[in-house]
Amino acid sequence: MQLSRKINILCFILSCMVFLTGCTTAETPSVSSPSSKNDMISSTVTSTQEQPPKVKTEEELRLERIIEDMKDMTLEQKVGQLFIVQPEALTQERGYVTKCSEDILENIKKYQPGGIILFGGNVVDPAQLSALTESFGMIEGIPLFISIDEEGGRVARIGQNENFYVHTYTSMENVGKSNDPIAAYEVGNTIGNYLNKYGFNLDFAPVADVNTNPKNRVIGNRAFGSDPLLVSDMVGSAIDGFHSQNIMTTLKHFPGHGDTKGDTHKDYVSVTKTWEELLSSELIPFISNLKKTDMIMAAHVTAVKVTSDNLPCSLSYEMLTGRLREELGYKGVIITDSLSMGAIKKNYTSAEASLTAFKAGADILLMPQDLEESYNAILNAVKSGEISEERLDQSVQRILVLKDKYL
């Protein structure tokens, strides 16, 4: 009996010791530092609530795919992507090309240009045009931009051809007078529909210029009007219309060709407005649609009160990189206006124009005077280190991302 009582007392003492030990352990965090307590809480949250994996956007996945594909590209292939040329630049034949010949195919394989541009002389009738664009679309390798100037109105390579039964427009100015963005959407949708039907994927339209100078001989009724806000709305709706037909768009002619008297097709033309003045008018349609458009075309006008280099905007680092890229934040493709126009070919060699434009920030060099000369100038500049391969890759990446999205 006495022994049993002793055992019970001993068990009670042991129980008390266990209880006191548990309390001491539970109270241990109270003497820890605040940081330790936070670490403990963070660890507990992390372990009990696993963070879901981040879902990559379609744009991020596309970019990863392009970067991976570019690892297999040669330097020559990358340089070729910078050029959009007329088919006449790829053959020794004279006159406008109306069908794809063997030497054109051979030169496409040689230079692997980024794209082809067709003009009115290349367009005969629906059957011929479809066959021509189809032949370009069947070429193996990186798909081509198959492009055209089809603004509607007086600049319409197909619309102005009587062999095509497509809806035509008197001018974009008349469309603008409706003050109805839906009318501009219908322009893009209608033109985009027949461009898609005839094998095109890129249109150098819509015109984003504001027709602010009545003496302007280049833009005139090609613009939607003289009110920058109206032009901005109409341009945005036209882009939506083109996109509804899977046609890429190009805003032109940055930073605005609407307040000029001269014609860059012929020779040097200057814009006398300051940057602030351009921001309050000519630039509004561009800025409002930077995220919508696929390309922006740089004009050959010289903005004498904006840049200090006295170069056409298409060749100006201050304008393309300093203003358009860095200040306005444009991230898409920059393409030059035709490098065969008088403002360029009368003042620069083909190599000079192409090198200067590319160094300035252009991604695509449109219609150089001499493809071989321009191609070799860029290629040799990259090989010598005058142009870094990183800079080349930036442009090629933008071009391929666009192609992957649409083609």
Image (cartoon, grey):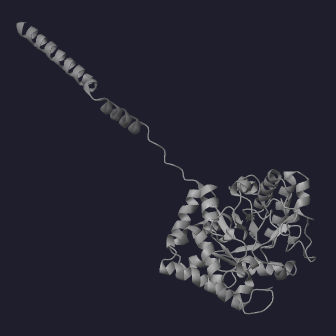
Where 251 sits versus 130, above or below?
above
- In this view, the residue in front, 310 or 72, is 310
Hey, which residue is sitting farthest top in the picture?
Answer: 1
- In this view, the residue in front, 196 or 112, is 112
Quadrant for residue 44, please give it. Answer: top left
Measured as percent of width and height from the top left, residue 327 is found at 61, 56
Measured as percent of width and height from the top left, residue 80 is found at 61, 79
Q: Is residue 383 left or right of residue 129?
A: left
- Report the quarter where the C terminus lies: bottom right
- In this view, the residue in front, 308 or 145, is 308
Q: Is residue 194 at least partly visible in the picture?
A: no
Where 68 sits versus 371, above or below?
above
- In this view, the residue in front, 199 or 340, is 340
Measured as percent of width and height from the top left, residue 158 is found at 86, 74
Q: Residue at x 38, y 35 (%)?
A: 42
Count numbered badges in the picture.
0
Where 347 sits versus 13, above or below?
below
Quadrant for residue 192, please give it. Answer: bottom right
- Report the quarter where the N terminus lies: top left
Q: Is residue 219 left or right of residue 395?
A: right
Q: Residue at x 90, y 69 (%)?
A: 166
Measured as percent of width and height from the top left, residue 18 is found at 19, 20
Q: Is residue 148 at least partly visible in the picture?
A: yes
Q: Is residue 56 left or right of residue 132?
A: left
